[in-house]
Image (cartoon, rainbow, N blue to C red):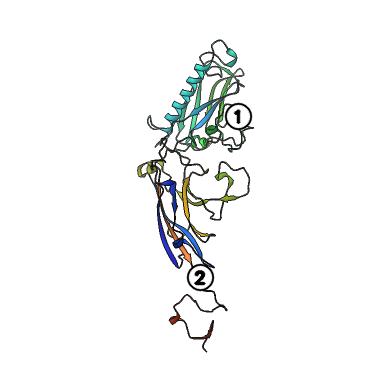
Amino acid sequence: MRGDLTKFLFIDSALDNGKVRLPARPFSCHGHEQMSLTLIQFTMKRNFPLINTYNNTFYLYDTKNQRYHEVVIQGGCYNSFDTGSESLMSAIQTAIDVTIAAAIAAVPANNPSVGQPGHIPTPNVTAIAVGYDKVLRCFTFVPTITGTIAADNTIEIRCFHVKNNSPPPAGVSRNGATSDVHEILGLKTIFDAASPFNCAGVENTTSSGSITATLLYGFYPASLSTLDSVYLRCDFDVGNYESPHLDVSKLDTDELQHSFIFAKIPISSSNESELEAHRLIVYEDTNDVYQKMLPMKSLGHLQFYVTDKRNRKLAAFAKGQEEFGQMHFDLVMRWDKFIGPKEMEHESMYDNRLPPQLLPKTYGYGQPRM
């Protein structure tokens, strides 16, 4: 809804992280006047990795020795699940190979209590082959087993997504404890760090009570990204509320929390390869969807910033990317002032904002000549 007075604000976040100072007089109101801000246009280059520190960390868990082995997928943008050496499946395979090699190298040859020499600490598991089921759209994980292993001596895949105020288990990093990697892998996730479990499905082949072959698989469709929208947030009260799950630092509760989200900007295409080609996030408003009536009477400064769905800064390809203006966004905001009817001794039946020559002649306020 347009006000009686309108101004447009063109903001580039490349300088001072989207913070701007406004001259107070042009952006103020008095008495019963009100003002609002409306998001008209938002554009941003997609200069951030879709696989990043927020969604690339999971764990191989050794059930015998109760030890976590961290797996970190190389950050970046992957255009396919299983096609070519630059696919997501290939990146997961490389990450697992690195983890297993490090675990093998760390096993002391003279201490079999922590595992067999030359193997990952779970005995006789020397590798894990990653596959992708195109029909079910899920990843599979097949450990290479030399000989047999006991039924209670296996490898599990564990994904954590606990709140920042919950301590992670020993051997689990902060990135790994709050990761969205379960969405990438299509696995279950652990919300309560005190009650962990195997997040993958399991099919075992047994012989004489021992496991001779095992298959770990995803329950749900895998994904190349966990980011379907970016959230435009501000540093002033807009009267909005959000689910606590939209802020990784907030406690789990079913009560909506006060929010500084100004707008949710969808990444319009669900086709990740198409996103890679266009590399743009664009929002154009046509119906004042994000118009906020402001409680204050004057605007001295504004700051807008962009986060992911968990109120975290967007991940960068390299350190300093945001600082040097390589992750900036552009905004067009509309500022409106609503003057409203003039204060009078009696309520007028006419719109007193009309020029006097257009109002009917009256004997008194609001009393038209008969």
* Residue 191, quarter of the rendered image: top right
What residue is at 51 percent from the left and 64 percent from the top?
A: 34
Q: Measuring 44% from the left and 66% from the top, which residue is drawn there?
A: 5
Q: Quadrant of residue 252?
A: top right
How far apart, in angstroms, are the residues tagged by discs 1 and 2? 59 Å
Side of 131 relative to 168 (left or right): left
Q: Earlier in the sequence, mark 1 or mark 2?
A: 1
- Find residue 323 and report its horizontal and vertical position in percent: 41, 40
Is 103 rendered above or below residue 299? above
In this view, the residue in front, 307 or 122, is 307
Rendering coords of residue 370 (x, y %): 52, 89
At 35% from the left edge and 42% from the top edge, which residue is drawn? Answer: 277
Name the residue type under label 1. Pro
Residue 169: which disc? 1
The residue wearing badge 2 is 340
- Asked if residue 3 is positioned above or below residue 315 in the image, the reply reads below
